[in-house]
Each structure stands twice: as structure tokens, then as C-alpha cells.
Amino acid sequence: MSAHSLFPADFLWGAATSAYQIEGSPLADGAGPSIWHEFAHTPGRVHHNETGDVACDHYHRYRDDVALMRELGLNAYRFSVSWSRVLPQGRGPVNRRGLNFYERLVDALLEQGVQPMLTLYHWDLPAALDRLGGWLNPDSAHWFADYARILFRALDDRVKLWVTLNEPWVVVDGGYLHGVLAPGQRNPYAAPIAAHHLLRAHAAAVQAYRAEGRHQIGLVVNLEPKYPATETVEDLNATMRADADFNRHYLDPVFLGSYPPELADIFGAAWPTFPDADLDFIRQPLDFLGINYYSRQVVRHDPGAWPLAVAKVRQDRQTHTGLDWEVYPQGLTDILQWVASRYGALPLYITENGAAFYDPPQAEGEVDDPLRRRYLRDHLCAALAARQNGVNLRGYFAWSLLDNFEWAYGYSQRFGLIHVDYATQQRTFKASARFYAEVIRSHGGVLFTDGAGM
Ligand code: IFM
């Protein structure tokens, strides 16, 4: 591997988090409750009834956490803003103290030479808006654009990379179709409507940004390449359905102005007719696309599996993470190349990539996590392969900076580069963090030397 083919000097090396997962103190300083606050406080919704009340206490420890980023050599950090800290009722009067927290965080990042990438929505809708129907209410697009405008006005002088939504597929699939995530609805009629309003909200925020923003705005989706288990017509069609639901549902409208035709078959009578004008509106030009990649799916036809008639074929001979996600680095190269070929050459970022593994207790001050370190190395090699094949990849954000609240799994799953002792809030670099620091320092060179230690 020659030096010129490694990552360029301006490549963004980051880590990602989200507000509810790390901040704690969700009602501090005048904040309103979010749907995640209410969901986690509903018995039986989250593993061991755990909540984000304390999480990583980042709300109070953000300066120390920024210092850790600096120590790792990160030049970028992706975080999200809690809508209900800024607007406790989701709309109406601004809560200055909530907004000030994000101003202080951004200033701390910039002081340490870390470029912020700010996500406006990472799943924590203000509970007050959910009472008005949440993403099922057509007005949600206006609520979101109004909220986004407040952030643009406060922070566009310092934030150069803006993200509208994080992972709309998860918001819809978990929150409105299967009910395992907030707000906990299980309704096939709701899911396509929530998805459509999320896309309208995304577009409305992009439009608002074009009116007053001076930098870049994009969308973050989670993508998972789908491969057929066999070449039978049934499995090939099932693979197309899975791909339409997971990957094209959100990207086709944004880049091509239409929904994938398979969605009407999947949802049947629950699939509405959407106005053409909405689809024209959703297709706002973007400055970049963020891709969250964790795993792939090998697909077979399963008529009993609601609503997609699709089942995953577990690849028993492969390594799986704590969430039983197959480790499949080649899928990252494949999905990056697929996006570039289907949607064009816009700049791409890997905005999340990482793995939950059990980190066994060790001597104080040490957390060796060889599986996560290997996951990181192999996925960075896969990202580099995509770059070498012409993909316009501009940065990589590991998920996650810190161990944190993994939604319905509570604190049972650790994704962090940095171990968090939840009893003391002590942070400890894992071996994967030290390895990532070396990758950054060497622009990727260490991926191909003995220093990779694998
Ligand atoms: O923790 C989540 C994150 O909030 C969104 N993307 C996937 C991560 C791991 O499940």
C-alpha cells in the first residue's frame, strides 16, 4: 500500500454520539421531556427499566469529554441537539439555557480544534409534539423547520456541517411499525405516513438552511446491503423488498423524487397516494450524505414474516456482535459504491460505524477490546477500498465516543471507544481508542503495519 493511497490530510476523523444517549439531566435548566424520556420511564419498555436520566453525565462533563477527543486526535465530532432542551414544548418560546449548553459545547470543540457536525434530530421528539400526533401530523415539517432555524441562527457562524435527521428508517420501523422504540406505535398505516412527514421535515429544514445558512447540510441514513440467500425468484424478490424498505425508501425520494415501487406491495392497503408536489419538495439538493453502517443482511423469502415477508439467514460461521449483528466489512465497501453509482458523486461521510461487544472487567486503567479493534481496522480498510474505487468519501465517525444508553437495550450494550463506569462516571480509553488514535496520526498507515497488532 503506497502512502499516496491512504487517507488524505483533510479527511475528517471523528466519533459520534447523540443527546439522549449520553447527556443525562434531560429535564435540567428548563428542558421539556422528550418521547424518549417518557418511553424509558414507562415500565417494561427498556432493558432493566434503565433511563437516560444520568447516562454519561455529558451535560456536566462535556469539557472533559472534549479533552478526551483531543487526546485521541479527533478532528471532528458528531453530536445531536435535544429539541426539547431548546424548545421545551417543541415550538413556541426558546429556552435560552438549553440553547446555551450547545453553544458552550461547540465553543469547547472549536477551542480544541475539533470540527462539530451537528445533527438536529436523533430520535428525541419533544413529548409535547407527540401529543399533537408527532410525525403523523403534517405540521411536523413546519415545527422541525422552525426549530432548525433557531439552531441555524445561533450556531451557523461556528458549525459548518449540519445534519437534518438521523436514521429515519429506525424512527419509522422502531417507533411506528414495530413499537420497540419511542413513541412505541405498532401500526402499518402509521409507518408510511411518519416516513413521508420525516422526509418533508428534512426538506423543509434544508430549504430553511438555503435561505440563511452559509455552510453545508445533509441527511444521515443507516444502510444495510441485502444479499439473496439463494438465486430463487422468491429470494431475489424478497431481497428487493428488503432493500426497498431499508435502503431506497429514504434515498430514492431525496435524490430521485419517487418512492421505490416495492413499498406499495409491502404496505398494501396501508400505502397512501402521496402528492407529486410533496415528492418534488423532498428532492432538495444536499451538500453531503452521511451513511451509518453496521452490518449486512442475507435474505430469504418468508411468507410468515410481517410485513415484508423477509427473513434474515444468520451466517453462523461469521463473527457476530453483542446485538447479534454479523461483522461484514465488505458490506461497507459495497454500500458506499452502490450509493455513489445510484445517487451520484456527492460527498459522503461514514457518520456511524462500530460494534457492541462485551468488554470484560480488567486491571484498573485497562480495557482490552480486541474484537472492536479488529472491527475498526477491517471497516477502515473497507472504507479505504471504496475511496480507491472512486467513492468521494470525506470522513469517518466511529460509533461511539463513549459507552452509552443503547435505547431499548439500556446500558447492556457497549459501543464506546471509551469505557464508562456508570457508577463513578470514570472514563477509560479502550485499546480500540488507542488504535484509532494511531490510525488518525498515521492517516491510515498503521492499518497496514504490524502496529495493527492483529
Ligand atoms: O446507538 C445507535 C445510534 O443511536 C443510532 N445508530 C445505531 C447505533 C447502534 O445501535
Image (cartoon, rainbow, N blue to C red):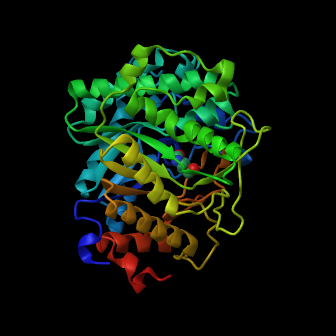
Q: Is residue 340 above or below residue 181?
A: below
Q: Residue at x 66, y 20 (%)?
A: 270
Residue occupying image coordinates x 58% and y 43%: 52
In the depicted view, which residue is nearer to us: 104 or 433?
433
Percent x, y of residue 236: 64, 45
Q: Identify the residue at image location x=59%, y=35%.
A: 36
The answer to whether residue 127 is seen in the rendering is: no
Q: Position of residue 387 (x, y in %)?
A: 33, 60
Position above or below: 255 against 73:
above
In the rendered image, residue 272, in percent from the top left (x then y), is placed at 58, 16
Q: In the figure, 427 relative to 410: above or below?
A: below
In the picture provided, is 320 more to the left or to the right than 194?
A: right
- Left or right: 449, with 128 as reference point: left
Residue 262: image quadrant is: top right
Q: Is any part of residue 410 visible from this angle?
A: yes
Residue at the bottom extreme?
Answer: 450
Quarter of the image that includes the N terminus: bottom left
